[in-house]
Amino acid sequence: ETGVTQTPRHLVMGMTNKKSLKCEQHLGHNAMYWYKQSAKKPLELMFVYSLEERVENNSVPSRFSPECPNSSHLFLHLHTLQPEDSALYLCASSMDRVETQYFGPGTRLLVL
Amino acid sequence: AQRVTQPEKLLSVFKGAPVELKCNYSYSGSPELFWYVQYSRQRLQLLLRHISRESIKGFTADLNKGETSFHLKKPFAQEEDSAMYYCAPFDHMNRDDKIIFGKGTRLHILP
């Protein structure tokens, strides 16, 4: 499959669970991003990785932990989340940080 | 500090009428500007960017440095234009910059 893929597409978890979101891109891009999209704040940048190094952390709580093992894969590890963390989590990639971002379909997360 | 403003949360326009989605930015540098669109049940995608100076799906956007604006325009709205639109500036002269998305404007085309 080409483009940016995300798994799972839907996730329901309790506040004590640990889960991970996965993002994969097959576009040969060097930068990858995590965004949070919710009704209250339509599009919030969470993390930016460029050439597998984290270059941006937008004051995200430590219960969100990103991992970028290589330029094609990006993970978001979740633990002890709160109900207000329920949202659509979008992954994106771009050739360079100045270039167009290509978005995945998102993971719809519900925290109970 | 960089900031982008999309003053309208919701814009309703009749089919066939002109559309203008406003975007103002506050920048000290020389920005590259993007418009992204999210149609219902589809992923967020690029609509157009300033540097390419293209017209995509009938939409154009002109950078007005004096007014620091990058409004998105289309002369005749179509029903399929209903979507969420995000303006996103990027200061490409500042390598430490990050792209910041506006809060978005939901465009609703009325039949």
Image (spheres, coloured by chain):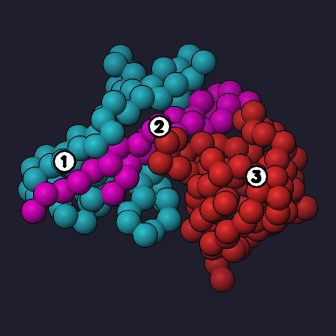
Chain colours: A red, B cyan
Q: Position of residue A88 (x, y in %)?
A: 58, 58
Q: Residues within 10 Å of mark 2 (few under 14, many from 20)?
A: many
Q: Residues within 10 Å of mark 1 (few under 14, many from 20)?
A: few
User: Per the image, is B50 magenta?
Assistant: no
Q: Do marks 2 and 1 both belong to one polypeptide chain?
A: yes
Q: Is residue B41 above or below residue A78?
A: below
Q: Would residue A42 be found to the left or right of residue B18 on screen?
A: right
Q: Which residue corresponds to mark 3?
A: A81
Q: Position of residue B67 (x, y in %)?
A: 34, 19
Q: CA distance from mark 2 to mark 1?
A: 19 Å
Asked which quadrant contains residue A104, the reply is bottom right
Q: Is residue B60 above or below residue B16?
A: above
Tell me which segment is drawn in magenta: B83-111
Q: Which residue corresponds to mark 2?
A: B102
Q: State which quarter of the image contains the N terminus of chain B.
A: top right
Q: Residues within 10 Å of mark 3 (few under 14, many from 20)?
A: many
Q: State which quarter of the image contains the C terminus of chain B.
A: bottom left
Which residue type does callout 1 highlight? Ser
Which of the pair B87/A80 is nearer the observer? A80
Point 87% across, 47% down: residue: A53
Q: CA distance from mark 1 to mark 3?
A: 37 Å
Which residue type does callout 3 highlight? Leu
Q: Which residue corresponds to mark 1?
A: B12
Point 15% across, 49% down: residue: B13
User: Per the image, is B91 magenta?
Assistant: yes
Point 68% across, 31% down: residue: B97
Mark 2 or mark 3, whichever is nearer to me = 3
Which residue type does callout 2 highlight? Gly
Provide the chain ID for the residue under circle 1: B
